[in-house]
Amino acid sequence: MIKADNTLVMSGVQLFKRHTFLSVLITLLLVCSQVSATMPNEAPDAGKLLDMTYVFDEKTIYWPTAEPFTLEKLDWKVTPGGWWYASNNYGASEHGGTHVDAPVHFSEKGRTIDQIPLNEWIGPAVKIDVVSKCLKNRNYQLTVKDVKRWEEKNGRLPDNVWVIMYTGIDTRYYPDRKKVLGTAKSGKEALPELSFPGFSAEVADFLVKERHIKGIGLDTPSIDHGKSKDFQVHRICFAANKLAIENIAALDKLPEKGAMLYVIPMLIKDGTGSPARIFAVLP
């Protein structure tokens, strides 16, 4: 009787172990299938990738008082050993061409480029198209009404979103310095003649206080319009610890919503800004 009971007990234990093992195995298989479904096993199709970066060269547009991009070719030749070798030296201001601004740019206690986690640069993007208004007024400033009109059509701005202003200035004229900046002059004498669209202080305040945005960007050299003398948009956004992108390319091809924006800045220690490779994965 005792032996029979022991046998029954052992059979029960074995059955329990087998059942537990199968349960764990099934759970693991389900988890793996869910993970594989959410993780792409190959790069996005080329047709879904939109490069939004202007090449850096001698034509790259910089702020009139900033150092322009320079490239010095060093060895571009076949070595005595018989193999090819090439290298360059390059230099430039942080703020020029397709680039980003860190909060420290206009906020004394703001973060530097190297203090911003990579995931903060990546997020959904919406495009607010005001090209027709900018063609009529080179100094047009995006308004709260423009944002709410977009929301009436597309719904409330999603959280952690990049709000991109499409002015058409760079798309049509880059890299023509005079047509983009409003002047061909360099140095401080160019500053009074700057003329291009940007965000308004009113809309910057609205976006950082009334909406949960990641940052703002546009296709001109500054998030403040060219005639600005106090750079209120920079000051408002960076005091709120938001990010900014300037001189974005190919905005004519970015949809109003649905794209995921990837902003990859150079990781500069104590950087106030940085050249960046920017691209979108289209819906």
Image (cartoon, helix red, strand yellow):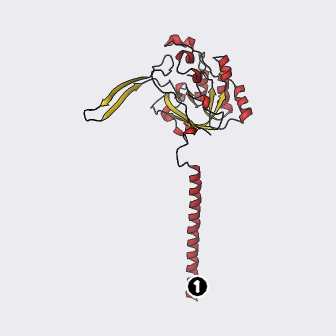
* Residue for point 58% across, 85% down: 5
Q: In which quadrant of the rendered image does the C terminus lie?
A: top right
Is 221 placed left or right of 91 in the picture?
right
**Toward which corner of the image does residue 153 lie, by quadrant?**
top right
* Residue for point 70% across, 26% down: 146
Position of residue 113 measured from the top left corner of the image (x, y, whole percent): 49, 32
241 up-or-down from 28: above or below: above
Q: What is the residue that sits farthest to the bottom in this orientation?
A: 1
Q: What is the residue that sits farthest to the left in this orientation?
A: 80
Residue type of the residue flagged with mark 1: Asp
Which residue carries the number 1 mark? 5
Q: Which of 9 and 277 is in front in this view?
A: 277
Q: How many marks?
A: 1
Q: What is the residue that sits farthest to the top in this orientation?
A: 189
Q: Is residue 112 something that shows in the picture?
A: no
* Mark 1, secondary structure of its residue: helix
* Residue for point 55% across, 76% down: 14
Label 1 crowd (10 A; few <14 / some 14-19 / many >=20): few
Position of residue 275 measured from the top left corner of the image (x, y, whole percent): 49, 29
**Toward which corner of the image does residue 142 lie, by quadrant?**
top right
* Residue for point 37% across, 26% down: 89
Position of residue 120 measured from the top left corner of the image (x, y, whole percent): 56, 37
Q: Is residue 120 something that shows in the picture?
A: yes
Q: In which quadrant of the rendered image does the N terminus lie?
A: bottom right
Q: Which of 140 and 75 is in front in this view?
A: 75
**Toward which corner of the image does residue 159 lie, by quadrant?**
top right
Is 272 placed left or right of 202 in the picture?
left
Position of residue 33 measured from the top left corner of the image (x, y, whole percent): 58, 56
37 up-or-down from 179: above or below: below
Q: Nearer the viewer, residue 220 or 192?
A: 220
